[in-house]
Image (cartoon, rainbow, N blue to C red):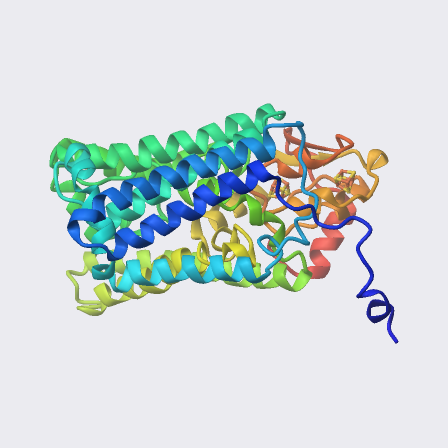
Amino acid sequence: MSFLAAYSDQPLAHPTPEPSAAERLWLALVALGLLALGVAALAPAGLRDTAFWLGLGLLSAGALGWSWRKFGGSRGVRHNFLWSRASTSRGAVAWAAGVALTGFYVVLYWWPAYLENLIRPLDGLSQLLRGRAADQWFLYGSFYTLAVLLMGGRALLKYRHSPYQRVRTASVMFFQLGLAWLLPGVLLALQQPEFYFTYFWPLKYDYLFPGGVQSLLQNGHLGAFMVGWGIIMSFVATPVLTYFFGKRWYCSWVCGCGGLAETAGDPYRHLSDKRREAWRYEVSIVYTVLGFIVVTTALLWLNAARGGALLGRFSDEFAQTYGFFIGSIFAGVVGVGFYPILGSRVWCRYGCPMAAYLGLLQKHFSRFRITTNGGQCISCGNCSNVCEMGIDVKQYAQRGEPIIRAACVGCGLCSTACPRGVLNLENGPREGRYQPSQLIHADSLRILS
Ligand code: SF4
Ligand code: SF4
């Protein structure tokens, strides 16, 4: 009889604690909110709007109340029992959440007519903000922003002892609410392009495709400013800011995808695959996506310069293919839908061309590193556990080596979770960033990252 079989029916020394009565009450409000939204999705027009707003209200109150009960007490990172709760250890609850999220994305992209009852209650808000009726993308943007704000509130409570986490969380909430939801809506109301100032090529690839540039330039000075903004942010600001601060200035402070991962995805950050094979997949996939978007952009411009003689109609199909497979399926359906199963940064790690671009800069042209005081490390593994990018931080900490990895988004959670103050996010001089053993280590893996 194996060791595990012999002890599998023994009670655990520290059984997973049940939620308190107050926590259950708040969670019941969340469940009622979801139920009301389900009713709204099917109800006739008279009941629809009431159920929708009641659902959102209950959901919001329940999420914030539960966060307050759960994290409002003692300060400090408490990640106990994450690997034994069904909701955070790929149990039945996690699978149910993953299927529901994935299903929502599938309906949103391909059968939006089924969401009509959830879109129409937002007409009033959409008219107020954008001067037009709501559509599926307004519904999506509103739900997305609400998720970042609610779960951002949770993150602010949970990590309130850390000034870095407080400011970083407030930053992603601000950029999502202000620049990714309010401002594009106001621009639409003013009959201007719905432009997102926080997304740049190669992530928002079409902003620098010939068709995107031409369409923006039809909007006078503002359109020209938007094109200039995109070019400067992609090719000047990104290298300069990454040189000084690493990719964290974007991935953990500004980007909406990162913002959702850091807030709504926080309960699942430990699920990222830390195996070396996953690192190999990460490198081969993410740089392929970056290469694909660079080649696509170059071909489209070459085609435009030759008056369409190079690709003909194929140029549009080329761009649409990328948009479908990478923009819709990878970033949305897999990237967010699979949070509860694969972790919160699947898209950022394996699919985002902006993360790949920033990662190359961070690895080879940046002052950013995480320094480690190996003598203090007690090998608890908290740092590796919380790393959403699948970096085995402990391995570096034990050897006292600085962490210089293209994947690191500088979320700082490894440092926040470390009980011994071993890890520090720093922007030091480039000289001496690498240690000889790291060069050998990287060489043996034959990897770029
Ligand atoms: S660096 Fe800190 S969190 Fe990581 S293993 Fe060492 S003591 Fe634990
Ligand atoms: S190494 Fe630390 S700062 Fe970098 S992504 Fe992982 S947890 Fe975040």
Q: What is the count of numbered marks?
A: 0
Find the residue positioned furthest to the bottom.
Answer: 1
Q: Position of residue 16 (x, y in %)?
A: 70, 49
| Left or right position of 122 against 264 | left
Q: Is residue 97 above or below residue 75?
A: below
Residue at image coords 11%, 42%: 218
Q: Which of 87/241 is in front?
A: 87
| Left or right position of 292 against 424 | left
Quadrant of the drawing holding the N terminus? bottom right
Which image quadrant is residue 414 in?
top right
Residue at image coords 66%, 49%: 82
Q: Position of residue 39 (x, y in %)?
A: 29, 53
Which image quadrant is residue 301 in?
bottom left
Residue at image coords 19%, 39%: 126
Is residue 353 visible in the rendered structure shown here?
yes
Q: Position of residue 275 (x, y in %)?
A: 68, 60
Q: Position of residue 203 (x, y in %)?
A: 38, 49
Q: Is residue 317 above or below residue 265?
A: below
Which image quadrant is residue 149 in?
top left
Looking at the image, in which quadrant does ligand 1 appear? top right
Residue at image coords 76%, 33%: 419
Is residue 410 visible in the rendered structure shown here?
no
| Left or right position of 8 against 24 | right
Q: Which of 116/308 is in front?
A: 116
